[in-house]
Amino acid sequence: MCLRSRNFLPGVPEMAQQPTCSCSSTTGPAGPTRIIFPCAGQANTGQLTNLAAIQLTEEGYGNIACVALLAIGAEGLVTNAKKADEVIILDGCPMMCAKKIAAEQGIIPGQHIIVTELGIVKSGSGDYTDKDIETVVSAAWEGSGRPETTGKNGKKPGPGGCGCGDSCGGSC
Amino acid sequence: MVTIEVLGTGCANCKRQMSNVEAAVKQLGITAEIKKVDDMAQILERGVMILPAIIVDGDLKISGRVADVPEIKKFLAGGA
């Protein structure tokens, strides 16, 4: 799109044509809907996933949801997760409990982040720092848990690269 | 050399956008001039109405959301 051809709309007051920032809405007017499942495990890394998911929700990245509710197969949550543009799973360690719980419900994440793979050591102390939380939050914003070939809900992009998992036959 | 303009007013989303652009450029190993555009007059001049936004060599690539690193790498590499 060439920016030089874009002009103010005639007849519309200039104030109404001020740029707006997507940070004032939940995920931004053009942003995808995301559901974030933290494993919320007992160890420091598990607790970090919870804190990171809360911060990501506050920053408008997506909405935190309860992995325990997902584990019992709550119909509404499963439906919402499948309808979301993207599911983000935050696991504290390579046990990948949250990912396994999601898989049981047929949910494949678009992003899967494992805290211990970000250089944070799992320990029984329960200690964490603000920097640790920021490390996990940044990883999600950067998309570092996303395989580059992954499309919508973790499905591989169709022929058109739309990410619908090929159900469109290349039409969308 | 690619010129990347990151438009935003300095809020959290705009900072995330800048950070992601820097990470994408670093990972690709390309030479790029990254400009932060936070002046409202300059943003208006570029015709962008929803922030944050990314302009690459004069073309608007992203507007109204934060693009992640794989997405930025894709269009910097000429994918979209």
Image (cartoon, helix red, strand yellow):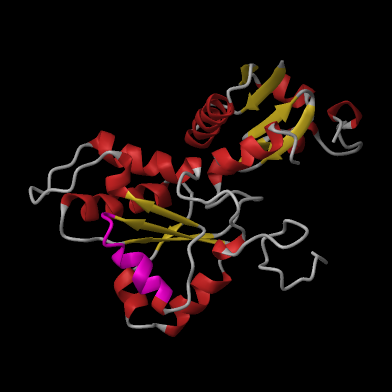
For the image, the number of numbered tags is: 0
Residue A36 visible in the snapshot: yes
The image position of residue B13, as x and y in percent, is 52, 37
* Image vertical order of residue A88 relative to residue B57, above or below: below
Q: Is residue A102 magenta?
A: yes
Q: Tell whether A72 sits left or right of A81.
A: left
Q: Is residue A67 magenta?
A: no
Q: Quadrant of residue A69?
A: bottom left
The image position of residue B68, as x and y in percent, is 56, 41
| Quarter the C terminus of chain B occupies | top right
Q: Residue at x 55, y 51 (%)?
A: A27
The image position of residue B36, as x and y in percent, is 60, 19
Q: Residue at x 33, y 69 (%)?
A: A67
* Image vertical order of residue A30 relative to residue B52, above or below: below
Q: Residue at x 56, y 66 (%)?
A: A84
Q: Tell whether B15 sits left or right of A73.
A: right
Q: Residue at x 84, y 29 (%)?
A: A3
Range shown magenta: A92-103
| Quarter the N terminus of chain B occupies | top right
The image position of residue A75, as x and y in percent, is 45, 84
Residue B66 visible in the snapshot: no
Q: Tell whether B14 sits left or right of B7.
A: left
* Image vertical order of residue B10 relative to residue A9, above or below: above
